[in-house]
Amino acid sequence: MGLVAANRPASVQRYTGTTQAFSLVKFIYSINIFFIASGYLDAGKITSLMFQDGLRATTI
């Protein structure tokens, strides 16, 4: 923490810490939702609808 952060009240420091942790949790959940959705796409029927024009679905 720099000099600017040291001059803040403790409540403001706690608030910024919790918002950073909350945004990290939201980021992790969005990655999980993406992988769950891609798992459903790999199940078959939705990919056959999406890739009717000859494109192949590539797995990561």
Image (tube, rainbow, N blue to C red):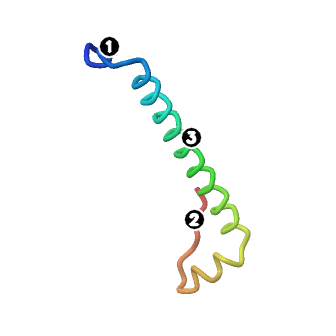
The residue identified by callout 2 is 58
> Relative to 27, is 36 on the left or the right?
right
Tell me the crowding category of disc 3: few under 14, some 14 to 19, or many 20 or more residues within 10 angstroms, Cα based.
few
Determine which of the numbered discs, if any, sits on residue 6 in the image: 1
Quadrant of the rendered structure where residue 51 is?
bottom right
Determine which of the numbered discs, if any, sits on residue 25 in the image: 3
Q: Quadrant of the N terminus?
A: top left
Q: Quick one: 33 or 43, which is closer to the camera? A: 33
Instruction: Tell which circle, 2 or 3, labels the residue nearer the N-terminal end.
Output: 3
Task: Say which residue appears at 26% left-offset and 18% top-offset.
Answer: 4
> Relative to 36, is 52 on the left or the right?
left
Tell me the crowding category of disc 2: few under 14, some 14 to 19, or many 20 or more residues within 10 angstroms, Cα based.
few
Q: Which structural element holds mark 1?
A: helix
The span from disc 3 to disc 1 (Cα, nearest Å) is 26 Å
Amino acid on which disc 3 is placed: Val
Q: Quick one: 36 or 1, which is closer to the camera? A: 1
The span from disc 2 to disc 3 (Cα, nearest Å) is 28 Å
Quadrant of the rendered structure where residue 39 is?
bottom right
Task: Say which residue appears at 65% left-offset and 80% top-offset.
Answer: 48
